[in-house]
Amino acid sequence: MIILRRSIGVLLGLMAALVLPGTPPAIAGEPGELGAEPPKVELVLDVSGSMRANDINGRSRISVAQQAFREVVDALPDETHLGIRVLGATYPGDDKEKGCQDTQQIVPVGPVDREQAKGAIAGLRPTGFTPVGLALRGAAQDLGTGGTTRRIVLITDGEDTCAPPDPCEVARELAAQGTHLVVDTLGLAPDEKVRKQLVCIAAATGGSYTAAQSVEQLTDRIKQLVDRAKDTYTRTPAIVAGGGECAKAPLLTPGVYTDRERFSEHRWYRIAVRPDQELRASVSVGLDRPLNRDYGVLLRATATDGRELVRGTDAGSGRTDVLSAGLRWSATDPEEQVDEETTDDEEPPPTPTVCLVVSNSFSASGPVDAQTPGMPVELTIDVVERSPAPNSPGLGKGWLLLGVLTVAGLITGLLAGWLTRWWVATWRENS
Amino acid sequence: MKPTTLRRAALPFLAVTAGLLLPAVPAAAAPTSPTPSPGAVTVTKAGTSFLTATGISAGQPVKVAASTGDYLYWSFPASAGETNSITITVTLPSAGARHGAATWTVDVFDGLRRRQACTAGAQTPSVGKDDPRVALGCTLRTVRPWAEPWSGDPLPGTYYVRLSTTELPEQDLGLPVQVEMLVSTVDDGGTALEDGKLKAPLVPAVEPGSVLTGAAAAPGATPSPGASGQPGLAAGEDEGWFDGWFDGWFDGFSSRWIWTSVGGILAAVAGVVGFALTRRPRRLTPR
């Protein structure tokens, strides 16, 4: 009896251990450590004549912008390097050629001296033209090149009066230059033309557009954008140029890459994947320009002989920022492959390469040669340990199994007991 | 052993067994609106791309100011057996500032940026010009512990949420909106999970890669471990002393071995109990 009770206790303990849920694995992807480079952001403020207009809750546009700037400078995180550039601030004349060169950096990009910066902002008077394109180029130069994301916050109330260069094309050109540059735009009491232009600039660089309607909203938005520069600057992908065919494609290691791809272009990449490894790849194509309504992106993995291994695809229509596809692939039977190759020579077998090709079905009205530079492509490659197919033949699992086994055992015991009784009874009678 | 005492012992045993078997019936989940976990810190940020997505965890409320037309990204981790659902409420600008109807969309992607299907919820609601707010929702499929590389099934790892406006009057771009989001998780313990395990969760690489050139690009070069911090298995590395012994029928230790063994023990014990129940009760022995 004691033995039975004890065994029940053991059984219960065992069951309890089974019932306890396993703790989920910690899998949150932690961002990389902060780089040595500080986050860099430049505010570009339009100080053209139209900023005098008193149409933001009865205050002039420039005074609203000045107040927002003061508050942003006060709340600036210490590690952020901030610069301020103005356009149309100094030349009051009518000569368009001169007025369209009018852009200066009033606070250099670096650790901010708050008092000096606020003094510089307070002295601004609405004056001249609106050379937005030139100011963007200047801001990109101010921020310099480096491994981290740069952010430009453009605040303006009027459309560019100095095109060419068209500011939207300037933005696209700057984004394609290699430095990871994002332009966020803020429109002060914008009309339709300004809005379209600012939306275009933002879309070309993966930035955002906001129509500012009050000083609080403007301040909060600039603060948010400056904070965003701090959050995001460490993860600039490596630049790569995909090949036109697999044999000439660059060999990539795990990590994140950017490239550019024109309409209907194919870009090839190669990745070494051992038979015991699994390839993971994803691609995002950015929609940085006006496009026809329907589009698609296709990511294929092929063997070096052109045989398709797996594909990832996505399609869509309408307004969006990026279109993405991804895939996983691992060799079907690694053991066999390895054995085959190692029997011949002592050398380890060469690592097989897998080709990746990114293609798209984007289109736009207008000439195709206007589509340079291509659309931004972001490629993520990872090579991890292969996850083999599960295999536990003949074994069961679950509460129902336990129930069925127990009931079957009970019935067998009862049957055996009755049979024994019957047999003992007949044996007694006969003896 | 006396049959009476045995029988007396058998009753609680049966009761216990029945109690253990009861959880086999999944408890019907009460349809409650999702609530943030107690003590969770509200997130006031959102990323603007996959790489800059703001990491949150299930049960953590998100409250962020944004502009119409923004693309807002968040990411959250999910493990096998979980069913995640996302609820978003967007407070729209006043009707006077808007020019027409708009369509909002919540898209969910897995760690490989593959679009995930929503099994329930208003994924792309349309709002009229005068609606003060719009509610979006998406219930994902239950995360599986393993799937073939060729399949698109949801797997453990990072999931991305993207909130955007797909259709709106062009004049309405850039207006201020307030976004509230909550990712809630139902860990459905009642459903038996399939076997298998993903060796490395679908956590995307975030570090810049490097292009191999020259000698390193020659065939046979060994790629470095995964950038997401999941080291690849070195070639020829021994997995354990039993590796290769039982190939084909023994696939390492799995919980199925415990379940089946316990089932066998229960059957044996139940058999003994059943046998004992059939003993004719003898006359009560005087104490």
Image (cartoon, rainbow, N blue to C red):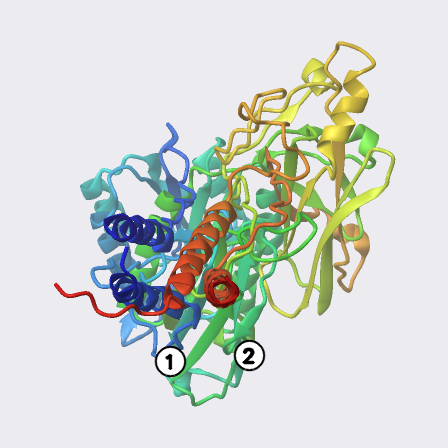
Which chain does the residue under circle 2 lie in? B
What is the quadrant of residue A366 in the picture?
bottom right
Q: Position of residue A49 (x, y in %)?
A: 40, 62
Of all residues, the one furthest to the front in this rendering is A431
Which residue occupies the foreground of this view, A92 or A335? A335
Secondary structure beneath label 1: loop
B196 over A252 or under it: above or below: below
Q: Residue A354 versus residue A81: which sits nearer the camera?
A: A354
Residue B151: in sight, yes or no?
yes
Q: Is residue A212 visible?
A: no
Find residue A81 and report its horizontal and vertical position in percent: 33, 38
State left or right for residue A211 relative to residue B230: left
Q: Is residue B167 above or below residue A88?
A: below
Kindly report which numbered mark, 2 or 1, lies closer to the viewer in this rendering.
1
In the image, A334 versus A149, the foreground residue is A334
Label 2 neighbour load within 10 Å: few <14, some 14-19, many 20+: few
State the mark number for residue B31.
1
Q: Residues within 10 Å of mark 1 (few under 14, many from 20)?
A: few
Compared to residue A69, the image places residue B10 above or below, namely below
Residue located at (74% from left, 50% from top): A311
Residue pointed to by mark 2: B169
The chain ID associated with circle 1 is B
- Picture coordinates of residue B81 (x, y %)? 47, 58
Residue B242: give x, y in percent of width and height: 56, 26
Left or right of B62 on screen, residue B67: right
Residue at x-position 36% and y-position 79%: B30
Q: Quadrant of the C terminus of chain B?
A: bottom left
Please identify the quadrant where the N terminus of chain B is shown. bottom left
* Amino acid type of the residue tagged 2 in the rendering: Pro
Disc on the earlier residue, 2 or 1:
1
At label 1, the amino acid type is: Pro
Inter-mark Cα distance, 2 to 1: 36 Å
